Amino acid sequence: MNRDSFAAGERLVSPAYVRQGCEARRSHEHLIRLLLEKGKCPEDGWDESTLELFLHELAIMDSNNFLGNCGVGEREGRVASALVARRHYRFIHGIGRSGDISAVQPKAAGSSLLNKITNSLVLDIIKLAGVPAVTSCFVVPMATGMSLTLCFLTLRHKRPKAKYIIWPRIDQKSCFKSMITAGFEPVVIENVLEGDELRTDLKAVEAKVQELGPDNILCVHSTTSCFAPRVPDRLEELAVICANSGIPHIVNNAYGVQSSKCMHLIQQGARVGRIDAFVQSLDKNFMVPVGGAIIAGFNDSFIQEISKMYPGRASASPSLDVLITLLSLGSNGYKKLLKERKEMFSYLSSQLKKLSESYNERLLHTPHNPISLAMTLKTQGEHQDKAITQLGSMLFTRQVSGARVVPLGSVQTVSGHTFRGFMSHTNNYPCAYLNAASAIGMKMQDVDLFIKRLDKCLKTVRKEQNKESNVSGVDNYDKTEDVDIEEMALKLDNVLFDTYQNSS
Amino acid sequence: MNRDSFAAGERLVSPAYVRQGCEARRSHEHLIRLLLEKGKCPEDGWDESTLELFLHELAIMDSNNFLGNCGVGEREGRVASALVARRHYRFIHGIGRSGDISAVQPKAAGSSLLNKITNSLVLDIIKLAGVPAVTSCFVVPMATGMSLTLCFLTLRHKRPKAKYIIWPRIDQKSCFKSMITAGFEPVVIENVLEGDELRTDLKAVEAKVQELGPDNILCVHSTTSCFAPRVPDRLEELAVICANSGIPHIVNNAYGVQSSKCMHLIQQGARVGRIDAFVQSLDKNFMVPVGGAIIAGFNDSFIQEISKMYPGRASASPSLDVLITLLSLGSNGYKKLLKERKEMFSYLSSQLKKLSESYNERLLHTPHNPISLAMTLKTQGEHQDKAITQLGSMLFTRQVSGARVVPLGSVQTVSGHTFRGFMSHTNNYPCAYLNAASAIGMKMQDVDLFIKRLDKCLKTVRKEQNKESNVSGVDNYDKTEDVDIEEMALKLDNVLFDTYQNSS
Amino acid sequence: MNRDSFAAGERLVSPAYVRQGCEARRSHEHLIRLLLEKGKCPEDGWDESTLELFLHELAIMDSNNFLGNCGVGEREGRVASALVARRHYRFIHGIGRSGDISAVQPKAAGSSLLNKITNSLVLDIIKLAGVPAVTSCFVVPMATGMSLTLCFLTLRHKRPKAKYIIWPRIDQKSCFKSMITAGFEPVVIENVLEGDELRTDLKAVEAKVQELGPDNILCVHSTTSCFAPRVPDRLEELAVICANSGIPHIVNNAYGVQSSKCMHLIQQGARVGRIDAFVQSLDKNFMVPVGGAIIAGFNDSFIQEISKMYPGRASASPSLDVLITLLSLGSNGYKKLLKERKEMFSYLSSQLKKLSESYNERLLHTPHNPISLAMTLKTQGEHQDKAITQLGSMLFTRQVSGARVVPLGSVQTVSGHTFRGFMSHTNNYPCAYLNAASAIGMKMQDVDLFIKRLDKCLKTVRKEQNKESNVSGVDNYDKTEDVDIEEMALKLDNVLFDTYQNSS
Amino acid sequence: MNRDSFAAGERLVSPAYVRQGCEARRSHEHLIRLLLEKGKCPEDGWDESTLELFLHELAIMDSNNFLGNCGVGEREGRVASALVARRHYRFIHGIGRSGDISAVQPKAAGSSLLNKITNSLVLDIIKLAGVPAVTSCFVVPMATGMSLTLCFLTLRHKRPKAKYIIWPRIDQKSCFKSMITAGFEPVVIENVLEGDELRTDLKAVEAKVQELGPDNILCVHSTTSCFAPRVPDRLEELAVICANSGIPHIVNNAYGVQSSKCMHLIQQGARVGRIDAFVQSLDKNFMVPVGGAIIAGFNDSFIQEISKMYPGRASASPSLDVLITLLSLGSNGYKKLLKERKEMFSYLSSQLKKLSESYNERLLHTPHNPISLAMTLKTQGEHQDKAITQLGSMLFTRQVSGARVVPLGSVQTVSGHTFRGFMSHTNNYPCAYLNAASAIGMKMQDVDLFIKRLDKCLKTVRKEQNKESNVSGVDNYDKTEDVDIEEMALKLDNVLFDTYQNSS
């Protein structure tokens, strides 16, 4: 509503009230102006009213929402379904242009602003989360793996001779595949066992660099966030090796934004050595739907090169999600989530420790891993493998999601490469174990339910294994509460056991 | 977004594109300004984008959406559920104040504007629909019956001696109850049969006025839209009687806005005689959910008195619905709906005529009823009553809604008054019949399905009645299409027959 | 999705996963079943997913959502605007039938269920909130005033001779108008001053009953929740008088559901004497938009009579709002809100006391009022009236909503009756004062902002009144924070002062 | 609602009505079952009610919507913002698994089903649109360019020696970049001029194949839909060359699904020769937001290899959009859109012809291009280049989007390769021209407005160029209507001209 509209409004109802309403409107506009001018995440989250006003204002700057537009091109932002238009707040043109995913679209000033602001906000949050030295980043509507691929493809043009990527082993398929897809040969560096932890074998890295020759190496591809007992790579040392040998360094920081430790490693790595880009998942760090990642770095022009590597326009959907989320939370809201995550990690840790000990198991000592924990599964009796798989299946059926049982000796071939001890990041980890993580957004209730159900499952498995043994478990959990889930689970147990056995 | 925001935007993406977006925004604002200044329904419907921008702009003028508001009253527009807030576009304060449903709320400039504009738009549409002489109206969040009650309650204060309401009979409970609830004694004027039509007995009205004495009569309560074979009351003549005797005249124009004939009767009545207020349903005329009505009239101060009679605030929901609907349709869209309705009436009329004749029945000749039609049900054999009820039940089960079978001799007592021949508007209509109407929004497909299913039901009923008879029906309808509905219906037929028999 | 669909799903993705999904679905269905079977508010609130599933399931039981429906009636639930359909979750048919707002609609089984369940839930909550003896209630889409009118209109039919309503004075227009609109003569019983409190003059009530004769009295119309220094009526004693004299008793419990004290008064009144119905606002007690009320009582048949008095169908919108709200909150959520309100009342009380004393004012001692507080405004200097009005205007401009300044000697005529000392519930209250209330949903931030802004306004007013005086106010509030609001307010002060002076 | 819930419902309202509602529900379920069983696009579009029921049912099969779920993994589908959750219908887990974008997710049976069904529907539509021989396809949440890159990266593993991609020139950056990004060297085959058309130089292709040797060639990368005067490549002949030389063939069918001619070329190419995959944009063919593509082919295992190349999960957003769109439209709705597009193409063609002749220009004769048209811009006087650029700028300012002016002699370097005559697909096209296209969803009003505005712009440009000339233009267009846009445009003309000149 413009000045004339307000004047007309004053004639319809009392001028004083309309003027008060009009003044109140300015508070919303003030927030919007600050955002556009500073490009920073507001401290306090916006309410939905301001947020939707903002999105609406942006959307009507796109040509598909012009009232007088006539389109004679091949892509005019027309939408067949009103449901679809609405769910995208009428942003239809996506982000980027043929040449560059960060470029401005003449047809879509609103979407272009949305894209710029989102990237600016995300940059602000990365600084706040522990990498103040970051200078540039952009959201890309691809998951972490494909985003890593894009980084590798960009490096190819700078290092035409390179064939290899040095990769301290982490047993997650998409990490490995990101290199294969880009057309490179991963050089797997096995981890070393230090105490319970699996850590980067720096000497092996250095030896490989010597052996292959720096020019033949596209980059070192290291990892922060990972499942215990693996811990984040020794980024500082790797960064120094890279700097010294003139080898690029790409960090997979998948769900590391949520951990100040992971972020600190990146900040330090960049300070003392070389990190060219670090890639993180949007969904795992910002509680948005799967499908986006952030590519960030310390050198504007390299990050821009990557953004220019993406051929064509791209979905604005992940950008929109993270924009809505950050504006709703505000930086204070996001910090609060980070703090709660840390607290839940401690809580999960202590509860799991208690439980494991009651079953003569042990919480692995992995102090360098700030997110994931592992509890041994040593005492599962003779048919241990079956018992462990069954445990995994039972947990799944009982709606415990994300708990991962890791048996010994699993072998898997991924894109032609055979991994012994797959899932455990090493050929021969000393024991089977179960992983649980404290990720952003976890609630105390998640931990409590998990511990209760795990207790029940362990008890059941033990009973089956060892009819005579008298296991007690953690008796202080109320068994009555969770009856519904248990009943449901019993029906499914057999069906799922089979599936689980085949899939894992 | 204000000037500063756009300036900031220009620094983020190209100034030229932002400026184009900013200019495009003005087209939306222009429409909003016109609406506020003229208070008329736009000719062309608005698109959702403009509509939502407008609603959003209004909503942020309400104090519950002020970013800095602190509330220490007993009603602060707080909302517990985000779903609820959203579905009301954050308009929480309703409309009106303690004293007057049309009054402005200091706390809610936006809701107040919404209310004023809605009433203004609705007034515009009533003029356009055939009552150009109307001067004042307001939307009230009560259905037609309760709105009539409010009119009667208002008149009570002007006519303290009056006890009676003169009411040409129409067999719809809520019409009758509207008078009972207001505390008056309805004086039922039986209709006279002219050809097939049931029409107002003007002489009986005049006689009653003489008999009871004008001062003892609160008003005449007449009706336009109704089920055939009753037709709209003779409004002009009634209006003249009222004018001459100094008796107020309230018209129940329930679903008459959709018919130019009904509207014309009101216009003429007001021109030549007296009509104090006419009341119409929102849902039946404007395709919105049930729950609102419009009270309109030709004398501002009387209409205002009614609005001041409503004690307390009221729901803004019906006003919001009709506002959204009219802005979406535009006056052209609404006129188109009126035109299509008229066409469907002709189509339904001709199809029903054809069908009725194929069963040796007859479409009643009711040229004064522009909306409802009736087809005789004379030849249903010996157990006619049962057959007719069964027909009604079968149609219901076959998802024909709104078709009404009217048997002979039904007697019903409503609030102490016994109606013979209930549902037929007269004590002894010559034959049983079935009603169907062409109401706003009806599609050709509705007519076709109705005729097809009615054909099938009639055939079934006849067969059961008369095993040896050879009825043919309308064979040109494709029997194969509607198989699913038929199958489903067969399952339900018995259950529903019982219910239907008891309820009707 | 039915069994066949799941089977098909199992062929598309893994049977085990589909089966798990299918089992998980049952948890949602289980909650729905419990609700339908028990008709009670669930203890824990439902998540949006279950809630929307439930609403969706209900909606598709309405004929306007039948895929094969053909409508030939005058009201078929057609909707012109998709926005409107969506915001009502496709419930278009409203609630009730011509004869009865609680009746079942054949065309709309879903809406009918919605209506029944809502009434059942609301009954459950009223019990829980302190009136376990309640037996029947229904939601009506009219605000409290009009709902009281409906009660009075129903009583008229039982007490044809009655002309008067005995009404212990409460200065709120809609309470008074509810009786006028129903066509009765309110007999105002002035309150008596006990300490600072204004309380029911029981002797005057009894005298009036004798004087007018019970048969001429329609009912006693008492009030619970009200602005201090008035306190809830002495319900027990009034109920006994009513029981003894055979006079009906209608209680205006406007925003009393949120206070266990108000509810207890009703429970006790009904136990020891007579209460025919008690009426409460939906918006004020359940944090939903304005527009609905609950009519409740202890005698099913009387409550049913009232529901049958409403002529015609009615909006389902308020029922839908309260249903969504209660299912979202659960009874635990609602109880938590009640608890927090009580705590905020204590907090507001202590903060206001502190502030008032720093200005040589006093918090009125009104221990019987559990919701509203009053602080004297005695020391506003010579031009006290102007100062008080200015204070009110300043608070409004500073976005303090709901604070009410009550000057001395205001006279107002409502529907012909002149009230001296209007707004103060008595002809001559000893001093001017300011009201603030702790209503459901209030947050500590509301209290803090209110106290801060009131402090500032009082200081300003004092300075203007008394240039030489040295007032200190509450210095421990941070003055810097609220700068924006203050700046905005300064611009509006003059405009609004004029409006405020004229309107109040 | 399950059986028990319905039984409970029957006790609350009439069993007959509930049962009718319950039966009606089956119609919705029936549609869902058919979809799951057949995997085909329904002929008639679903209404929103069925669609949302279906999405809701799927969503509650995902673990993040399980009521009893406890998550202890690093990715649990938690969502911080309710707005975000809602806009994705609570599908949070995306599609695919680490290894494969088409794989089933144990945690998300609903999302997995959504993915399978979408791919199945899209396959059905591709068949219907003209490629019945297609056997496999999947939706990928990347735009066309990046999807082509993925195809090339997949081929790399099959053809390790290959370095080159044979590419008949088409001047769109993302096509070219798709090969660069994948790390290959595009071998540009210049088009030959046949009449006005630019067509594939088959001889040059064959020569290049010989010259480079098939093993060194990754694939031929051909194009269907393109801007006139280029026309779709000679797919049949290219496919035969590929088959004969054992070279893969990837077709960029960007917006070709909407044209039966483009689709027929693919069908024929695959029949007589070799096409390994064809890639099409979701937004350009299905009127959804930018960001998705379909990779389709005739060999299941190759298409699967591509889907396995995508490392990690991916956004479900584009899949959801196209699913909603296709279910809303039904195959009949989609066919209708295709038909209307064809009609608009004829209309645009005739109108543009008329207009061009009135300015002594000419519509280029490009019968092989079914979507795009070109009109010469020969007679723009001395400063032709400036005039042409100005024309483009003016059209943009007048909200004509998608019209493209192509001057002579533009030179541009893309990723190191210099293109002479850039935008015109050839080094030296005989004349400058203007493109306009008839894309899916275009309305007659688009054409009319375009012609009217183009007329006005041409007139203005001519006047400026040649003050003395008397041009008439198409005078039968109403000049008065479009005044607002013209006014707005005049303000922007200068600003935008500068921008336009620099950007193009």
Image (cartoon, coloured by chain):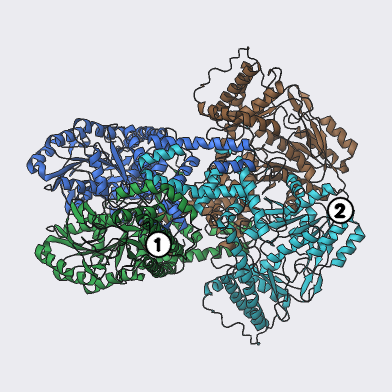
Chain colours: A cyan, B blue, C green, D brown
Q: Is residue C31 above or below residue C383?
A: below
Seen from the viewer's position, the closer of residues C98 and B406 is C98
In the rendering, at what x and y percent does residue D199 appear?
Answer: 76, 28
Density class for disc 2 (Cα within 10 Å; few <14, some 14-19, many ≥20) is some
Discs 2/1, front = 1
Quadrant showing the C terminus of chain D: top right
Report the side of D310 relative to D2 (left or right): right
Seen from the viewer's position, the closer of residues A394 and D447 is D447
- Which chain letter matches label 1? C
Q: Amino acid under label 1?
A: Asn
Report the side of C216 relative to C153 (left or right): left
Which residue is label 2 attached to? Answer: A163
Q: Is residue A81 above or below residue C99?
A: above
Which residue is label 1 attached to? Answer: C470
Which residue is located at x 63 percent, y 18 percent?
Answer: D464
Residues at badges 2 and 1 in contact (C-beta under 8 Å)? no
Report the side of B468 relative to D149 (left or right): left
Seen from the viewer's position, the closer of residues D370 and B487 is D370
Residue B274 seen in this snapshot: yes
Density class for disc 1 (Cα within 10 Å; few <14, some 14-19, many ≥20) is few
Inter-mark Cα distance, 2 to 1: 82 Å
Residue D312 seen in this snapshot: no
In the rendering, at what x and y percent does residue C241 appear?
Answer: 17, 70
Label 1: which secondary element? loop
Seen from the viewer's position, the closer of residues B124 and B286 is B124
Which residue is located at x 20 percent, y 72 percent?
Answer: C237
